[in-house]
Amino acid sequence: MTISIWRYSHLTLAIFSSIFILLAALTGAVLAFEPISNKLQPYAVKNANTLSLSKTIENLKAEYDEVISIETDKNDFVVASVFTNEGKSDTFYINPFTAKKIGDIIEKAPVFKFATNLHRSLFLKSTGRVIVGFVSFLLFLMGITGVLLIIKRQGGVKQFFSKIIKEDFKQYYHIIIGRYTLIPIVIVTFSGVYLSLERFSLIPSEKRSHVLIEEFGADIPKTKIQDFTLFKTLTLNDIRRVEFPFSDAMEDHFVLKLHDKELFVNQYNGNIVSEKKQGLVALASSWSMVLHTGQGTIMWSVVLLLTCIAILFFMYSGFAMTLNRRNNSIKIKNKFNKDTAEYIILVGSETGSTFGFAKTLYKALMAQGKSVFVSELNKYSSYKKAEHLVVFTSTYGDGEAPANAKNFKKLIDHIPQQNTLQYSVVGFGSLAYKGFCNYAIVVDSLLQLHQKFIPNLSLHKINNQSFNVFSDWVASWSKSKGLDLKIEKHINTANTENSKLFRVVRRSVINSDNSFLLELEPTQKLKFTSGDLLSVYPKNEQIERLYSIGKVNKNIVLSIKKHLFGICSNYFSELKENDMVLANIKPNKEFHFPTSAKEVVMISNGTGIAPFLGMINNKNPEPVKSYLFWGGRTKDSYKMYSEQIDKAFYNKKLSGLYISFSNEESQKKYVQNSIMEKSDLISRVLTNKGVIMICGSIAMQNGVLEILKNISASKLNRPLNLSQIKTDCY
Ligand SMILES: Cc1cc2nc3c(=O)[nH]c(=O)nc-3n(C[C@H](O)[C@H](O)[C@H](O)COP(=O)(O)O)c2cc1C
């Protein structure tokens, strides 16, 4: 079965039942406080459950005129119904050791009465109860389809609890919270359904009756109640309720309700007259009540409260994710069809974000007057006029096809193609997964094997939906097609409303690599750290530029390369001391200096060193050994960083520095070569649970990852553990 079946059933159930679930979850959250507040009342008497029934009765008889019943309730409070010496009938909590009254019976607060009515029947009496029961059943099914969805997305049951990458807040917590609240949700909803069925007598009743054990004998000598053997052996812990005989008649008896049975006890000699064992149905009813309401346990009530809050969060995040997916995927209104378009864009996407990139390319091509048709990989077909094919696809599960691409492999084999098309595949994935862009690799090889497809550009992989890497690909692809495409960013469009002002403290001279350092001081108190990102919108531009921040002396240090036509880098390169810059800080937790690792290796090339300039001078809580690898073109490239690096050495913050120059006469070496030379250091750090951070160009990152994989395989005999790697590359 495909993932979309589970998604659609999960969604259909959610839409249908949403308002009722909202009410049930809100009132459920309120009601979870009732057992907690009851349990916190001071009527529990220490060790009361160890007191024998006979002693309790003896105490009560000494204190009151007549005893009608004794009960231990769900909160373990002891309740007695008596006639007082003044002849008044009363029911209250007692201390069983003294039989004295310690409090009046708790009355249900109006807020709980209101919430209970709304929760049980929506104030609609029987109709409401039917609706609530049905919705509870739907929520139960949603819990089940939700698990199946997680299993499918994660690529199997074994991966159910495996790491999830936090790309989107809503999606991430929908899954994470889902994993842990699933069992309580199933329990709450199942018990809710059970209670509703019971209310409408739809649970088959058990025909259990009392089994006679001893006949009532005539003229039995009367034994004192406190001397009954049975009453001496039973403690209050065993008792749910004891009803005293109504009269002295021999046929009247004690009724003892224990946890698993009911006993009739002869009032003259204390012998058991008959017993009725509790059946499964009664047991299920009492458990359903406890599990659904949390009666008598603070811990379970807290779980129920958290479950209700989680359900409310699921409603918000589930609908928000659906809207996102729809916004991304539906809005492409093709002006051409598959047989009239010259450019075909096929998309493989699970949650819709890859469609956003397809839409960007679609718009850019249409703006140039090209005929374009966008569709899904699962709708692969023959294309009469097409000459160019672009495939954008994500990877899901454990390196598998996303939902709308699962049939592509079959289709490409069976559908004949008349024209020969030039193709290019772009993979959207995440380096945090073992098979980075695995499915894009599969699609690329399927096209390679097909006679009617000729490669145009080699497979391009994009980590974490990096728009910068995507625009690089668009630039090379459009060049290869002789086009001059202008793309607009479809995500994070200009949001300058919350921008902050930063004062330029210093801008270094531009070195032979066209790079320079820029130091900015926030004009207001801001929380940020090295590894966070500075987001800037250059004048009249909608596209955000992101720069990795090094935090040095509470200021922001950026390392920038000036590009010939780079609007932002040119703008920065012209800034002078005391100029003001409008920008935003974006937290980038994934690339913060690790807090618990004992050894950290920082690898960078070019301007990628910026966050590390801050990190090597950080005050780290733990003594941690840091090593810095950096690759640049010439010795001159290094000069502008030397002040910060020397300082770190002087303060013993840096334990090793490995620099390589790719364009020096005396040395032609890349950062990858230095890492290879220091493979012992790298394998030691990997073994000691250290962390390796990489910042700089994607090409460098790919090269470095290959070497790290080789080191891990050859020296440690295991695949590289990607959870030890942090990257921020562009
Ligand atoms: C549960 C899950 C599994 C994933 N598995 C992989 C994987 O095996 N390989 C990979 O490169 N990316 C993997 N990714 C990352 C996605 O492919 C990436 O976020 C992509 O941009 C999502 O695009 P989409 O929203 O269009 O599906 C996974 C993401 C999630 C949430």
Image (tube, grey):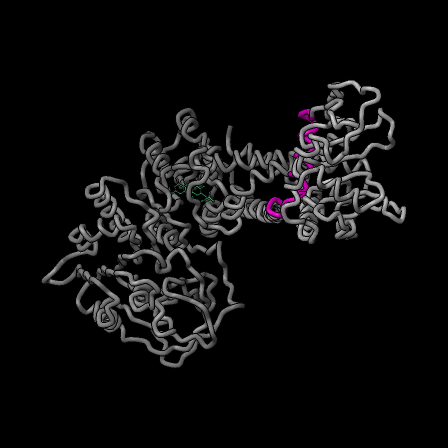
**Residue 704: x %, y % from top left:** 25, 50
Look at 78% across and 18% down and name the residue there: 215
Q: Looking at the image, which residue sits at the far right?
A: 87
Q: Is residue 511 above or below residue 416?
A: below
Q: Is residue 87 visible?
A: yes
Look at 30% across and 69% down and name the residue there: 617
> Which portion, as a residue range, is magenta?
278-301
Displayed quadrant of residue 281:
top right
* Residue 672 lies within the magenta run: no
Quarter placement of the C terminus = bottom left
Look at 48% across and 47% down and name the residue there: 353
Displayed quadrant of residue 344:
top left
Q: In this view, does 159 lie above or below 215?
A: below
Q: Pick whichever, 689 or 453, lies toward us.
A: 689
Q: Looking at the image, which residue sits at the far front?
A: 221
Look at 24% across and 44% down and name the residue there: 712
* Residue 295 lies within the magenta run: yes
